[in-house]
Image (cartoon, grey):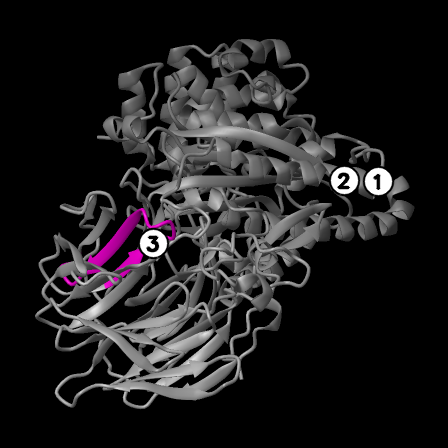
């Protein structure tokens, strides 16, 4: 730097500056020097002064600040080192003093304590200019020299003196011309003009620091972020459900499901020739603990107790069995045929009791209510037959436009639910069958799965086909939909447990599984992959513990899904399903 | 000075305290992720800690992610480099910061190594140069204080706005400028929430640290949207 030659003062000043600068500006200069001299006197004050000085204040203020930066330091040093300086320096106290305005005035007052400081007051003016120059570095010294003399005169901080000083300073510096001009023009005010700052790398630093402090951020800290992106959540989250969760969700479900569900079938039977047709209903389990299954043209009866199989009937070759259904007492089985004929067989005797005609297309589903047999056909018609009388057809239920594939009487016989390929669910009042009590259009695919809740009479569950995949729950009194589950696959059948507050659904593609759902929480307690192809039919054993499923893989499987805990009475009334069940529960086995 | 012979004990307590704080952070992050639904509830299991059931993630990826953060945090904590830890929850859709959990760490008594070098001007003016350490707290007291914070975090879901569930999170720290910064960490802005509401939660302190908790969140969607140009 040009100025450098001036030995003591400058160096001193610089050194002093560094310490003072420590707070905001310091970073560039700080190095080691500051440490010694600065610490006691200047400490925080200087820094604050500097920071302010950088920006705007009047000449007085500025000058002190700017002065402080350079000369102040020097004075301090001087003080430390040499007494002589005292003459020049006396005013200096201002430098150390925090308040800028006061500095000059005070300077005189304070001069005693800090002699050097006085100069600072003078210097300040030039310094501003210098400040630019300062950046450069050496300038300070020459200023200081001349300033001192002047300063003594100017000490009060008069404008003229200041200007003069400034001019002097500039001359020496060489850099200062512009600044000097600016100063004169401005007179006292100074100058914070941007022009002055142009050079200053230090200024920018100062600016940064002041900015940082204004924002409450310390330059001494960095905000660091852990850069890697956090793992994606596996699925969208609905916080509302989360808020309502019990604290330990996992244990809650497991507690509910302490009873273990065997995921392996209890028994597997071959069912060769089982027609892979969603719209048929070919499996039923009687209250007498016999399972009837329709395999192509034959109906077989498998006795769960003895394990024996009988072929009950074989149809004529031009047709096939499209549905089977046991009567409530387990003595008779109704058989629907592809021709639309409905036969009633006495299983004990192995004889056909009667044939009932009326449908002109296949009868895919049937349901008994005491002596009434309801049959649904491909035409969409549902007939009620009173099997005791010759004119068996007692009612014609017209609503469905397409094949009826689901049909269930409520256990008390007061209501009938039907589902069809027209995606409709109809709920009929047994006393008025001319039109359905409710017609529900929520499903978007054929409705085959229908089940009445055993413990709440007016609760009906219905499940839709491939494009729907939902289970809907209905209040059959009000017609309201009370709940829904999206199962994710075709719902082929639904069965309520008689022992647990649960419902089991069987499904088609893609899972071919059985799912047990708690009701009304709708939590899926367990999902069992059941078959290799879609599960077509299911039925519960009369004691309610076992589920039989038949699937397109031509197998019939028995699952112990609702095993009763010993000693607990069934949560649900048993009567509806197993009239004889009371005794049977203990002894029932399947061979 | 008295600190000369006291130092070993201090250091010992100090690192223990640091670990405690780091651990607190770990559980806090997990709790926030759970309570605010950043990850699905199924991904969390309850563990006993601070006399509470605290839900921590059992998702391998999330666990690994937090572990990485924690290992670095531990180092910084022991070095006394950290002044704030922040968990920012950001909406994935808008990229807006919707919630910001801030933990301010204050080092109560700066022993030997930690911060002598900087900010020393004030310090050196104090001839004694050290602050009286507060009376030692029992483990139980500290645990109770921490427990209270977790209860508050859990309870805060009642006043925090609903999140849409499609959120992600970031961890920030305010570290000293001279900290060693591994590759995975980079400078960031403060990710402050515009027009956020702030709620100061409880604090706890150990013999060496004090931690203040603050949550800020975006308040009243409509007003902010209308306000912003």
Residue A510 lies, in percent from the top left, at 31, 74
- The chain to which mark 1 is attached is B
Rendered position, A311 above or below A228: below
- From the top left corner, tell me how far across and down residue B223 is, in percent: 29, 26
Magenta run includes residue A414: yes
Quadrant housing the N terminus of chain B: top right
Q: Position of residue B204 (x, y in %)?
A: 70, 36
Quadrant into which the C terminus of chain B falls: top left
Instruction: Say which element carries label 3.
Output: strand
Please state which of residues B14 and A196 is positioned toward the viewer in this rendering.
Answer: B14
Q: Nearer the viewer, residue B140 or A520?
A: A520
**Quarter of the image holding residue A84?**
top right
Q: Secondary structure at mark 2?
A: helix
Q: Is residue A172 left or right of residue A444?
A: right
Eye-nearest disc, 3 or 1 = 3
Vertical relation: B49 (above or below) B133: below
Q: Which residue is mark 2?
A: B142
Viewer-nearest of labels 3 and 2?
Answer: 3
Badges 2 and 1: C-beta atoms under 8 Å apart?
yes
Distance in Å between CA atoms under marks 3 and 2:
54 Å
* Label 2, residues with CA under 10 Å away: few <14, some 14-19, many ≥20: some
Foreground of the two, A547 or A305: A305
Q: Which region is colored magenta?
A: A406-423
Residue A461: numbered disc: 3
Mark 1 = which residue?
Answer: B138
Q: How many marks?
A: 3
- Horizontal and vertical percent position of residue B196: 41, 31
């Amino acid at each position: 730097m040009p100025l450098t030659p001036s030995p003591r003062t400058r160096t001193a000043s610089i050194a002093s500056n560094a310490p003072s600068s420590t707070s905001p500006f310091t970073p560039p200069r700080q190095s080691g020097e500051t440490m010694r001299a600065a610490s006691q006197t200047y400490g925080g004050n200087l820094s604050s002064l500097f920071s302010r000085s950088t920006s705007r204040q009047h000449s007085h203020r500025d000058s002190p600040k700017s002065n402080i930066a350079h000369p102040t330091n020097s004075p301090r040093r001087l003080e430390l080192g040499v007494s002589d300086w005292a003459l020049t320096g006396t005013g200096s106290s201002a430098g150390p003093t925090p308040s800028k305005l006061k500095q000059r005035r005070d300077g005189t007052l304070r001069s005693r304590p800090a002699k050097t400081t006085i100069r600072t007051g003078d210097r300040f003016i030039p310094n501003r200019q210098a400040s630019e120059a300062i950046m450069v570095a050496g300038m300070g010294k020459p200023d200081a020299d001349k300033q001192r003399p002047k300063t003594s005169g100017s000490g009060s901080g008069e404008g003229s003196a200041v200007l003069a000083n400034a001019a002097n300073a500039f001359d020496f510096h060489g850099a200062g011309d512009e600044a000097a001009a600016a100063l004169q023009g401005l007179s006292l005010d100074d100058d914070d003009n941007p022009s002055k700052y142009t050079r200053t790398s230090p200024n920018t630093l100062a600016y940064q620091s002041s900015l940082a402090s204004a924002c409450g951020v310390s330059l001494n800290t960095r905000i660091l972020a852990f850069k890697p992106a956090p793992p994606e959540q596996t699925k969208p989250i609905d916080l509302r459900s989360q808020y309502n969760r019990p604290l330990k969700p996992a244990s809650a479900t497991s507690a509910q499901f302490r009873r273990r569900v065997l995921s392996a079938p209890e028994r597997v039977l071959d069912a060769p020739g089982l027609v892979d047709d969603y719209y048929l209903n070919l499996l039923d389990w009687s209250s007498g603990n016999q399972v009837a299954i329709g395999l192509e043209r034959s109906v077989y009866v498998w006795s769960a107790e003895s394990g024996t199989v009988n072929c009950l009937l074989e149809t004529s070759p031009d047709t096939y069995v499209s549905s089977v259904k046991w009567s409530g007492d387990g003595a008779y089985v109704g058989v629907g045929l592809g021709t639309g004929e409905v036969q009633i067989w006495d299983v004990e005797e192995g004889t056909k009791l009667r044939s009932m005609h009326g449908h002109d297309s296949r009868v895919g589903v049937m349901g008994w209510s005491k002596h009434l047999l309801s049959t649904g056909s491909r035409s969409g018609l549902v007939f009620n037959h009173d099997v005791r009388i010759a004119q068996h057809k007692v009612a014609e239920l017209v609503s469905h436009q397409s094949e009826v594939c689901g049909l269930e009487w409520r256990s008390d016989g007061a209501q009938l639910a039907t589902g069809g390929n027209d995606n409709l669910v109809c709920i009929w009042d047994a006393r008025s069958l001319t039109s359905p009590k409710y017609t529900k259009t929520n499903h978007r695919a054929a409705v085959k799965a229908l089940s009445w809740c055993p413990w709440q009479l007016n609760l009906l569950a219905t499940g839709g086909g491939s494009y729907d995949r939902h289970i809907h729950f209905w209040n059959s009194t009000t017609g309201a939909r009370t709940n829904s589950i999206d199962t994710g696959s075709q719902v082929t059948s639904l069965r309520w447990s008689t022992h647990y507050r649960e419902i089991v659904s069987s499904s088609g593609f893609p899972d071919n599984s059985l799912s047990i759902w708690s009701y009304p929480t709708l939590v899926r307690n367990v999902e069992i992959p059941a078959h290799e192809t879609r599960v077509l039919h299911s039925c519960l054993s009369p004691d309610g513990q076992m589920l039989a499923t038949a699937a397109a893989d031509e197998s019939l499987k028995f699952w112990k899904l609702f095993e009763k805990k010993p000693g607990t009475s069934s949560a649900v009334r048993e009567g509806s399903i197993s009239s004889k069940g009371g005794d049977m529960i203990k002894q029932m086995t399947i061979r | 000075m008295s600190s000369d012979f006291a130092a070993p004990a201090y250091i010992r307590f100090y690192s223990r305290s640091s670990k405690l704080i780091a651990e607190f952070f770990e559980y806090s992050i997990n709790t926030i992720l759970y309570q605010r639904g950043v990850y699905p509830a199924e991904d969390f299991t309850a563990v006993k800690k601070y006399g509470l059931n605290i839900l921590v993630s059992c998702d391998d990826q999330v666990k690994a992610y937090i572990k990485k953060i924690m290992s670095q945090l531990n180092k910084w904590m022991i070095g006394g480099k950290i002044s704030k830890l922040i968990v920012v929850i950001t909406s994935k859709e808008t990229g807006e910061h919707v919630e910001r959990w801030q933990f301010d760490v204050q080092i109560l008594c700066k022993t030997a190594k930690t911060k002598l070098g900087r900010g020393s001007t004030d310090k050196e003016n104090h001839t004694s140069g050290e602050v009286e350490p507060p009376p030692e707290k029992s483990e139980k007291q500290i645990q109770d204080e921490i427990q209270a914070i977790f209860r508050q975090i859990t309870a805060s879901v009642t006043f925090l706005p609903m999140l849409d569930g499609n959120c992600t999170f970031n961890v920030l720290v305010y570290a000293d400028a001279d900290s060693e910064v591994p590759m995975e960490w980079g400078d960031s802005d403060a990710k402050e929430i515009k027009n956020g509401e702030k709620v100061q939660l409880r604090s706890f302190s150990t013999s060496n640290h004090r931690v203040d908790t603050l949550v800020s969140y975006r308040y009243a969607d409509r007003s902010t949207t209308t306000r912003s140009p």
